[in-house]
Image: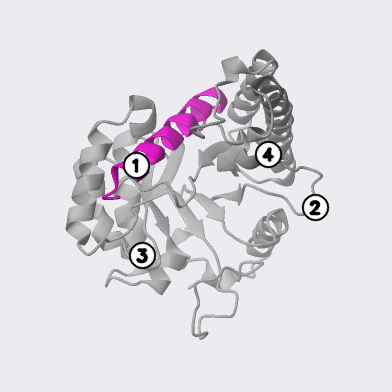
Amino acid sequence: MRFGLCCLFKDENIAFRTTTAKALRAMPRSEQLLKLSALCHDNARNLLHAVQACHRLGIGAFRIMSPLFPRMTHPEVGYDLDDLPEGDAIRRLLGETRTFARRHDLRLSFHPDQFVVLSSPHPAVVASSIRELEYQASLAEEVGADIINVHAGGVYGDKQLALERFYQVFADLPEAVRTRLTLENDDQSYSVRDLLPTCARLSIPLVYDVHHHRCHPDGLSIEEATQLAAETWRISHREPYCHLSSPRDGWAARDPKPHADYIDPADVPSCWRGRTMTVDIEAKAKERAVVKLMTELKSGKDQCS
């Protein structure tokens, strides 16, 4: 298994800057672009530092934060890299990140925010979602990321109809999006069993979140779900991707969905041992949690489920 870090750091001196549409609207367009250029340049530089830090720490994957380039798809203050004074320098930094990640076999991914919902019955939501996915696909091409992971969205009173809308929207997505898009089971609406037919129909890989599966079971064992999810990756000849987290207040809590700071090694499924797979660690302690888990597994503190 290779373990992945999600977006941010606790101890490393690496941070990503942002801004609001309100702040940008108060400026003339020329000042907007200067501000955005500086933010994007800093974030591109820190992305390179992030993948370098992951490699140094022995972490094999990094999830890039969605708003790496703040407000890029906003209908009023949005922009392209070509609009920014430092656009060429930003692209060079993204290229350095791509080169470093490939040289060190460090996998990069994106996980859009919850407002990206392709199954929505509201056309404006779908249109906004597609714009965001196109932005992330363009960024993914620049840095060499192979995954843009999404949830199926809401049920809207009819789960099958919602999945049919997802299918229809997927067919019209740009190739750069379609070839990277993955579906993840969630902890409330769509289980592994729910998503497998759509994944098969569209040849979309399934990102298996074992915490979500434990919170929202569907009759499949963890071993069965792991194997079925892994099979969805074969057609694209890519390494399966999974998510792992532990419940903040323990599995006996009324609500075991919130994530803990660290991973309990007992929550690592025993059937995952020996598999070639990427496992994003969704824990509040960020790189501390990833390094701690890797150390514990190596030392034998892995009484896995």
Residue 129 painted magenta: yes
Q: Residues within 10 Å of mark 3 (few under 14, many from 20)?
A: few
Q: CA distance from mark 4 to mark 2?
A: 29 Å
Task: Tell which circle, 4 or 2, labels the residue nearer the N-terminal end.
Answer: 2
Q: Which residues are magenta?
A: 120-145
Q: Residues within 10 Å of mark 4 (few under 14, many from 20)?
A: few
Judge left or right: residue 75 versus residue 299.
left
Where is residue 125 drawn, in percent x and y? 36, 45
Q: Disc 1 marks which residue? A: 124
The residue lying at 61 percent from left, 30 percent from top is: 101
Disc 1 to disc 3: CB gap under 8 Å: no
Q: Disc 3 marks which residue? A: 223
Taking depth in this image into account, of 121 and 258 the one nearest to the observer is 121
Taking depth in this image into account, of 76 and 176 the one nearest to the observer is 76
Q: Disc 2 marks which residue? A: 11
Main SS of the magenta part reads: helix
Task: Tell which circle, 1 or 4, labels the residue nearer the N-terminal end.
Answer: 4
Disc 4 to disc 3: CB gap under 8 Å: no
Residue 48 painted magenta: no
The answer to whether residue 274 of the structure is visible from this angle is no
Taking depth in this image into account, of 256 and 157 the one nearest to the observer is 157
Task: Tell which circle, 4 or 3, labels the residue nearer the N-terminal end.
Answer: 4
Where is residue 143 drawn, in percent x and y? 57, 27
